[in-house]
Amino acid sequence: MVVVLIILFLFGATHSFVSHACMDELGLLVRELELELVVFTTTLGQEETTLVCVACLMVVRGHKFKVNSICFPLQGLNIISMMNWLFSNHILVD
């Protein structure tokens, strides 16, 4: 199965996010947070969520990584990834 994803690598993002549609399409396992997380965006304003995908597998050029991503109603994107995650895992986007 081939799935094409649109990923935004964002400087300054404090967390990684996955869209609800992507979560459903990929069948990602979701856990409920013990608290409500409030996220502010320029397009959606304030949104609340209590869902997180824990230890989602991400493969970059054959190397496997586990990423925790907050489930969020993204529009036009499947995933937002923190740039800090790339740096800490020695991944260079060229």
Image (spheres, grey):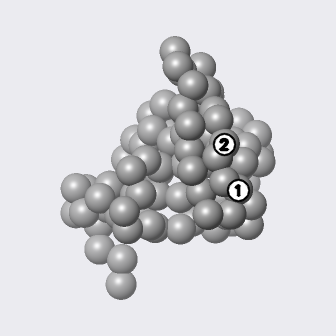
Which residue is labeled 1 in the image? 44
Give whichever of 74, 7 is nearer the camera: 74
Q: Split into 4 quadrants, where in the image is the N terminus?
A: bottom right
Q: Amino acid at mark 1?
A: Leu
- Residue 60: where, in percent of width, then height? 41, 62
Q: Residue furthest bottom?
A: 94
Which residue is labeled 2 in the image? 47
Q: Amino acid at mark 2?
A: Glu
- Residue 57: where, in percent of width, then height? 48, 43
- Residue 35: where, in percent of width, then height? 52, 19
Tag 2 and tag 1, C-beta contact below 8 Å: yes
- Residue 43: where, in percent of width, then height? 68, 63
What residue is shown at x 43% (from left), y 47% (from top)? 15
Query: Looking at the image, is 42 positioned above or below residue 50?
Result: below
What residue is shown at x 53% (from left), y 58% (from top)? 80
Query: SS for tag 1?
Result: loop
Residue 41 sits in quarter: bottom right
Residue 86 sits in quarter: bottom left
Residue 63 is at least partly visible in this image: no
